[in-house]
Protein backbone atom coordinates (compact mmCIF):
# COMPACT_ATOMS: atom_id res chain seq x y z
CA UNK A 1 0.00 0.00 0.00
CA UNK A 2 1.23 3.55 -0.65
CA UNK A 3 2.05 5.65 2.39
CA UNK A 4 -0.29 8.61 2.87
CA UNK A 5 -0.07 11.68 5.05
CA UNK A 6 -1.01 15.31 5.54
CA UNK A 7 1.42 17.87 6.93
CA UNK A 8 -0.57 21.09 6.52
CA UNK A 9 -1.22 23.60 9.28
CA UNK A 10 -4.76 24.23 7.99
CA UNK A 11 -7.77 22.45 9.42
CA UNK A 12 -11.52 22.50 8.76
CA UNK A 13 -13.68 24.53 11.11
CA UNK A 14 -16.80 22.39 10.54
CA UNK A 15 -17.30 18.77 9.43
CA UNK A 16 -20.35 18.01 7.29
CA UNK A 17 -21.40 14.42 6.75
CA UNK A 18 -21.60 13.31 3.13
CA UNK A 19 -25.35 13.01 3.73
CA UNK A 20 -25.49 16.78 4.45
CA UNK A 21 -24.68 18.33 1.05
CA UNK A 22 -26.48 21.49 2.06
CA UNK A 23 -23.72 22.05 4.64
CA UNK A 24 -20.72 21.42 2.35
CA UNK A 25 -20.21 25.18 2.19
CA UNK A 26 -21.43 26.11 5.67
CA UNK A 27 -18.07 27.90 6.08
CA UNK A 28 -15.20 28.51 3.63
CA UNK A 29 -13.25 25.82 5.49
CA UNK A 30 -15.90 23.12 5.89
CA UNK A 31 -14.69 19.53 5.52
CA UNK A 32 -16.67 16.53 4.33
CA UNK A 33 -16.60 13.20 6.20
CA UNK A 34 -18.37 9.85 5.98
CA UNK A 35 -19.05 8.79 9.57
CA UNK A 36 -22.24 6.85 8.94
CA UNK A 37 -23.11 3.17 8.61
CA UNK A 38 -21.30 1.48 5.71
CA UNK A 39 -24.65 0.73 4.04
CA UNK A 40 -24.90 4.43 3.22
CA UNK A 41 -21.72 4.75 1.14
CA UNK A 42 -20.36 1.23 0.48
CA UNK A 43 -22.84 0.52 -2.31
CA UNK A 44 -22.73 -0.55 -5.93
CA UNK A 45 -22.72 3.10 -6.97
CA UNK A 46 -20.46 4.26 -4.14
CA UNK A 47 -17.30 6.26 -4.75
CA UNK A 48 -14.88 3.34 -4.32
CA UNK A 49 -16.66 1.23 -6.95
CA UNK A 50 -16.85 4.21 -9.30
CA UNK A 51 -13.08 4.59 -9.02
CA UNK A 52 -12.00 0.96 -9.40
CA UNK A 53 -14.49 0.20 -12.20
CA UNK A 54 -13.76 3.52 -13.96
CA UNK A 55 -17.42 4.51 -14.11
CA UNK A 56 -16.97 7.82 -15.93
CA UNK A 57 -20.51 9.12 -15.34
CA UNK A 58 -20.44 8.32 -11.64
CA UNK A 59 -16.99 9.89 -11.26
CA UNK A 60 -18.25 13.04 -12.96
CA UNK A 61 -21.13 13.09 -10.49
CA UNK A 62 -18.83 12.78 -7.48
CA UNK A 63 -16.38 15.34 -8.83
CA UNK A 64 -19.24 17.80 -9.30
CA UNK A 65 -20.65 16.97 -5.85
CA UNK A 66 -17.36 17.84 -4.13
CA UNK A 67 -16.10 20.58 -6.47
CA UNK A 68 -16.18 23.36 -3.87
CA UNK A 69 -15.00 21.30 -0.88
CA UNK A 70 -11.54 22.11 0.47
CA UNK A 71 -11.06 19.46 3.19
CA UNK A 72 -11.94 15.76 3.33
CA UNK A 73 -11.79 12.85 5.75
CA UNK A 74 -11.65 9.66 3.62
CA UNK A 75 -14.45 7.10 3.81
CA UNK A 76 -14.61 5.17 7.08
CA UNK A 77 -14.91 1.57 5.89
CA UNK A 78 -15.62 -0.23 9.16
CA UNK A 79 -13.30 -3.05 10.36
CA UNK A 80 -15.77 -4.92 12.56
CA UNK A 81 -14.33 -7.10 15.29
CA UNK A 82 -15.30 -10.35 13.58
CA UNK A 83 -13.59 -9.39 10.30
CA UNK A 84 -10.47 -11.37 9.49
CA UNK A 85 -7.20 -9.57 8.74
CA UNK A 86 -7.66 -9.89 4.99
CA UNK A 87 -11.00 -8.04 5.11
CA UNK A 88 -9.62 -5.33 7.40
CA UNK A 89 -6.65 -4.85 5.07
CA UNK A 90 -9.04 -4.64 2.11
CA UNK A 91 -11.06 -1.92 3.86
CA UNK A 92 -7.88 0.05 4.58
CA UNK A 93 -6.94 -0.24 0.91
CA UNK A 94 -10.38 1.08 -0.04
CA UNK A 95 -9.85 4.06 2.26
CA UNK A 96 -6.48 4.77 0.60
CA UNK A 97 -7.95 4.55 -2.91
CA UNK A 98 -10.60 7.12 -1.97
CA UNK A 99 -7.97 9.27 -0.21
CA UNK A 100 -5.86 9.41 -3.37
CA UNK A 101 -8.83 10.16 -5.63
CA UNK A 102 -10.04 13.03 -3.43
CA UNK A 103 -6.48 14.37 -3.32
CA UNK A 104 -5.72 14.27 -7.04
CA UNK A 105 -9.14 14.57 -8.68
CA UNK A 106 -10.79 17.02 -6.28
CA UNK A 107 -7.61 18.90 -5.31
CA UNK A 108 -8.61 18.38 -1.67
CA UNK A 109 -6.67 18.47 1.56
CA UNK A 110 -7.30 14.95 2.85
CA UNK A 111 -6.42 13.70 6.33
CA UNK A 112 -5.60 10.02 6.93
CA UNK A 113 -8.15 8.23 9.10
CA UNK A 114 -7.20 5.48 11.54
CA UNK A 115 -8.72 2.07 10.92
CA UNK A 116 -8.03 -0.99 13.07
CA UNK A 117 -9.48 -4.32 14.12
CA UNK A 118 -8.82 -6.30 17.26
CA UNK A 119 -5.56 -5.91 19.18
CA UNK A 120 -3.65 -8.38 17.00
CA UNK A 121 -3.95 -5.94 14.06
CA UNK A 122 -2.15 -3.08 15.83
CA UNK A 123 1.26 -4.23 14.59
CA UNK A 124 0.45 -3.39 10.97
CA UNK A 125 -2.80 -1.43 10.64
CA UNK A 126 -1.19 2.05 11.05
CA UNK A 127 1.85 1.36 8.90
CA UNK A 128 0.47 3.20 5.85
CA UNK A 129 0.24 6.52 7.75
CA UNK A 130 3.39 8.62 7.40
CA UNK A 131 5.18 9.58 10.59
CA UNK A 132 4.41 13.08 11.89
CA UNK A 133 1.32 13.33 9.69
CA UNK A 134 -1.95 14.83 10.80
CA UNK A 135 -4.34 11.97 11.62
CA UNK A 136 -8.12 11.98 11.89
CA UNK A 137 -9.89 9.96 14.57
CA UNK A 138 -13.59 9.33 15.06
CA UNK A 139 -14.71 8.84 18.65
CA UNK A 140 -18.22 7.88 17.63
CA UNK A 141 -19.04 4.45 19.06
CA UNK A 142 -15.88 4.09 21.18
CA UNK A 143 -16.71 6.16 24.26
CA UNK A 144 -18.00 3.27 26.38
CA UNK A 145 -17.57 -0.44 27.05
CA UNK A 146 -14.97 -2.74 25.46
CA UNK A 147 -14.76 -0.45 22.41
CA UNK A 148 -13.33 2.27 24.67
CA UNK A 149 -10.58 0.02 26.02
CA UNK A 150 -9.69 -1.21 22.52
CA UNK A 151 -9.58 2.34 21.18
CA UNK A 152 -7.29 3.56 23.96
CA UNK A 153 -4.86 0.71 23.24
CA UNK A 154 -4.96 1.52 19.52
CA UNK A 155 -4.38 5.21 20.22
CA UNK A 156 -1.27 4.43 22.27
CA UNK A 157 0.18 2.35 19.42
CA UNK A 158 -0.62 5.11 16.94
CA UNK A 159 1.08 7.78 19.08
CA UNK A 160 4.13 5.63 19.85
CA UNK A 161 4.72 4.48 16.26
CA UNK A 162 3.50 7.37 14.07
CA UNK A 163 4.18 10.44 16.28
CA UNK A 164 1.32 12.38 14.67
CA UNK A 165 1.60 16.11 14.02
CA UNK A 166 -1.96 16.62 15.33
CA UNK A 167 -5.12 14.61 15.90
CA UNK A 168 -8.24 15.86 14.14
CA UNK A 169 -11.21 14.66 16.14
CA UNK A 170 -14.76 13.85 15.07
CA UNK A 171 -16.88 13.43 18.18
CA UNK A 172 -20.55 13.77 19.06
CA UNK A 173 -19.73 14.07 22.79
CA UNK A 174 -18.50 16.98 24.89
CA UNK A 175 -14.88 18.10 24.87
CA UNK A 176 -14.53 17.02 28.50
CA UNK A 177 -15.74 13.47 27.77
CA UNK A 178 -13.62 13.28 24.63
CA UNK A 179 -10.51 14.52 26.45
CA UNK A 180 -10.88 11.64 28.89
CA UNK A 181 -10.42 9.02 26.17
CA UNK A 182 -7.60 10.96 24.48
CA UNK A 183 -5.56 11.45 27.65
CA UNK A 184 -2.51 9.55 26.32
CA UNK A 185 -2.20 11.82 23.29
CA UNK A 186 -2.71 14.87 25.47
CA UNK A 187 -0.03 13.67 27.92
CA UNK A 188 2.40 13.41 25.00
CA UNK A 189 1.72 16.97 23.92
CA UNK A 190 -0.03 16.01 20.67
CA UNK A 191 -2.30 18.89 19.54
CA UNK A 192 -5.96 17.89 19.62
CA UNK A 193 -8.07 19.64 16.96
CA UNK A 194 -11.77 19.31 17.72
CA UNK A 195 -13.97 20.05 14.70
CA UNK A 196 -17.66 20.90 15.31
CA UNK A 197 -20.31 18.87 13.49
CA UNK A 198 -24.10 18.80 13.39
CA UNK A 199 -24.62 16.04 15.98
CA UNK A 200 -22.01 17.42 18.38
CA UNK A 201 -23.59 20.87 18.26
CA UNK A 202 -27.05 19.34 18.74
CA UNK A 203 -25.88 17.16 21.65
CA UNK A 204 -23.53 19.55 23.42
CA UNK A 205 -23.95 23.00 21.94
CA UNK A 206 -20.58 22.91 20.19
CA UNK A 207 -16.95 22.44 21.23
CA UNK A 208 -16.25 24.46 24.36
Image (tube, rainbow, N blue to C red):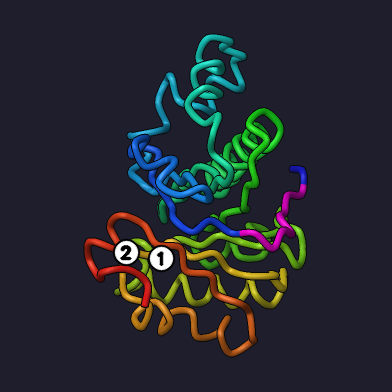
Nearer the observer, disc 1 or disc 2? 2
Q: Position of residue 187 (x, y in %)?
A: 58, 90
Residue ID for mark 2: 172
Q: Nearer the viewer, residue 176 or 45?
A: 176
Q: Quadrant of the C terminus?
A: bottom left
What residue occupies the far front of the structure in this picture? 28
Please, is residue 38 above or below residue 167 in the view?
above
Judge left or right: residue 106 versus residue 153: right
Q: Position of residue 146 (x, y in %)?
A: 35, 72
User: Mark 1 to mark 2: distance in Å?
Assistant: 8 Å
Q: Is residue 115 magenta?
A: no
**What residue do we see at 63% from left, 79% from top?**
190
Secondary element under disc 1, as helix, strand or loop, is loop
Q: Quadrant of the N terminus?
A: top right
How dense is the environment of label 2, judged by Cα within 10 Å: few (below 14), some, or many (20 and up)? many
**What residue do we see at 60% from left, 22% from top?**
51
Please, is residue 100 above or below residue 142 in the view?
above
The reply to whether the C-beta atoms of the residues labelled 1 and 2 are less than 8 Å apart is: yes
- Per the rendered image, the range of residues in magenta is 3-10
Please, is residue 138 above or below residue 188 in the view?
above
- Which corner quadrant of the image does residue 24 belong to? top left
Q: Nearer the viewer, residue 124 or 194?
A: 194
**What residue do we see at 63% from left, 47% from top?**
110
**What residue do we see at 52% from left, 31% from top?**
66
How dense is the environment of label 1, judged by Cα within 10 Å: few (below 14), some, or many (20 and up)? some
Judge left or right: residue 136 versus residue 34: right
- Which corner quadrant of the image does residue 203 belong to? bottom left
Secondary element under disc 2, as helix, strand or loop, is loop
- The disc placed on residue 139 is 1
Q: Is residue 6 magenta?
A: yes
What residue occupies the far bottom of the structure in this picture? 187
Q: Position of residue 119 (x, y in %)?
A: 53, 67
Amino acid sequence: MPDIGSFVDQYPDFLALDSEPGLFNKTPNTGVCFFKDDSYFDTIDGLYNAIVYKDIELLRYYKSRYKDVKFFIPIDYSPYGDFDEEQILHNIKKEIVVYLWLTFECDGIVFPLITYGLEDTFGWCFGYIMEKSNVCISLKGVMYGPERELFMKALKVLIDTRSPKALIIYTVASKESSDSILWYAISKGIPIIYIPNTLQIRNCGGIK
